[in-house]
Amino acid sequence: MTDLILGQVLSYTGDPFAEGPSAARVITDGAVAVEGPHIAAVGQAADLRARYPRARVHDHGSKLVSAGFIDAHVHYPQTAIIASWGKRLIDWLNTYTFPEEMRFADPAYAEEIANRYLDLVLARGTTTVSTYATIHPASVDAIFSAARTRGMRLFAGKTCMDRNAPDGLRDSARSAYDDSKALLEKWHGRDRLAYVITPRFSPTSTPEQLHALGQLWHEHPDCLMQTHLCEQTDEIAWVRDLFPQSRDYLDTYEAQGLLREGAVYGHAIHLSDRERARLIEAGASLVHCPTSNTFIGSGLFDMTLAHHLRVGLATDTGGGSNFSMLRTMAAAYEVAQLRGQSLHPAQLWWLATQGSARALRCEDRIGTIAPGMEADLVVIDLASTPAIEQATRRAENLWQAVFPTIMMGDDRAVAEVWVGGRRRG
Ligand code: GUN
Ligand code: ZN
């Protein structure tokens, strides 16, 4: 059975940071043909109706049909402590995050939050995330199981910490290696799931633990490795004290085999010239987390980096203050404005879809609409509230019509979500 999804179909033929907005392609009276888990064809609605006369038709009029959003850096265990008041990074971790992550020793609680989290993001049009779990292996089982039930492509890993974390929330170099390896062997490549080697960040890992995880990555080179880098200035000063032998924060990872293609660093705000150059040279990915970077007071990411390496976009739930990638695009726009850069809506949307797919090195499967890609789709109402509708009415082109939804849209803008060729909302 073929499904035909009709609307204004948005896809990308290139990178709008390199080529400008012309990298986006919009088919005004467009259609996407979905067969099984994949996209079979994209084109004019009239043509595809003729080609698939027996298809089930889902006519969305002038709504936007896009690839589903990809949130390239989240902590699903922080779902319940999102929007916690008044702290900066290290105090925020100690006050809110670590006590909450301790609760994931209970597999039933992990399962409850994993399901709640995926329901929240699917309702906001996010079809893939890359998430940190907690140190507990069962927290990884919980999120992969919840994703599998929903047919989602999902990246996750056990968060490793063997120092500067409370009792009950520390593993060791050995157990981090053993547990991560067992989880990787259990989940990586199963259905649409991918294991990510996940040291939390250098302040909570000894060099021995980073080394053990570097070794594991060496043994499983097709996995991604995710961690945090240069988020706050206090954090960087702490890393300098903890690793006196290292040239800089990035070097604490590089020295243990945790820098190369497939490394995905969250935040990366306060980079030295050397770090910047090495990241580019090594082909690493960075993830911009704008609502988190303002909410926890971290700083303003330099979006010009997107001209030099793979940059994805993320909520960083729950350091980020919202589950929505629309709100995250708005924050990315505002942060860039504060740095004197105006991001085009075509660039913002790309970051939340293909940019994140590239950062996670899965752009051959998800992140845009093209034949053969997996059918993860979101249908967006560009007039979802009276405030947005009245602003959109004046639009003279698609991007003017999309921008009010980027800036003011929320879950009410999400009309339909498709995951792996099936309707999920
Ligand atoms: N750095 C280390 N752990 C975290 C975390 O959970 N959230 C954020 N925003 N930064 C971190
Ligand atoms: Zn994070």
Image (tube, helix red, strand yellow):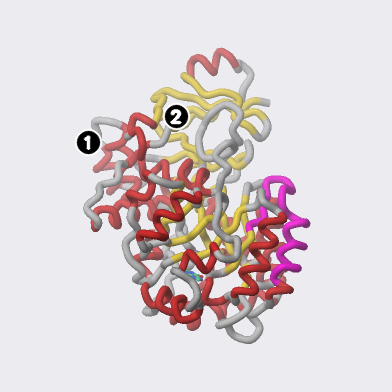
Left-right relation of 402 to 320? left
- Residue 344 in the image, given as x and y percentages of width and height: 30, 41
How far from the left and from the top, in percent, is residue 5? 53, 29
In depth, the one of 421 and 413 nearer the eye is: 421
Q: What kind of element bears circle 1?
A: loop
Chain part drawn in magenta: 176-196
- Distance, label 2 to label 1, CA atoms, is 28 Å
Q: Looking at the picture, how far across and down is residue 403, in whole percent? A: 30, 43
- Asked whether residue 129 appears in the rendered view, the answer is no
Task: Say whether residue 302 is left or right of residue 166.
Answer: left
Which mark sits nearer the N-terminus, 2 or 1?
Answer: 2
Tell me the quadrant of the picture where the N terminus can be found: top right
Q: Amino acid at mark 1?
A: Arg
What residue do we see at 40% from left, 56% from top? Answer: 276
Q: Quadrant of residue 327?
A: bottom left
Dot label at residue 319: none
Residue under label 1, please give it.
394
Amino acid type shown at disc 2 = Thr
Q: Label 1: how many residues lie within 10 Å, few (<14), some (14-19) or many (20+)?
A: few
> Do tag 2 and tag 1 residues touch (Cβ < 8 Å)?
no
| Mark 2: few/some/many CA within 10 Å (<14, 14-19, 20+) | few
What quarter of the picture does the C terminus occupy? top right
Residue 125 forms part of the magenta stretch: no
Which residue: 73% across, 73% down?
A: 175
Label 2 element class:
loop
Q: Is residue 314 at least partly visible in the picture?
A: yes
Residue in view at x 66 percent, y 35 percent = 37
Residue 406 is left or right of residue 257, and the answer is left
Circle nearer the viewer, 2 or 1: 2
Residue under label 2, please give it.
13
Q: Residue at x 42, y 29 (%)?
A: 8
Q: Is 281 located above or below residue 382 in the figure?
A: below
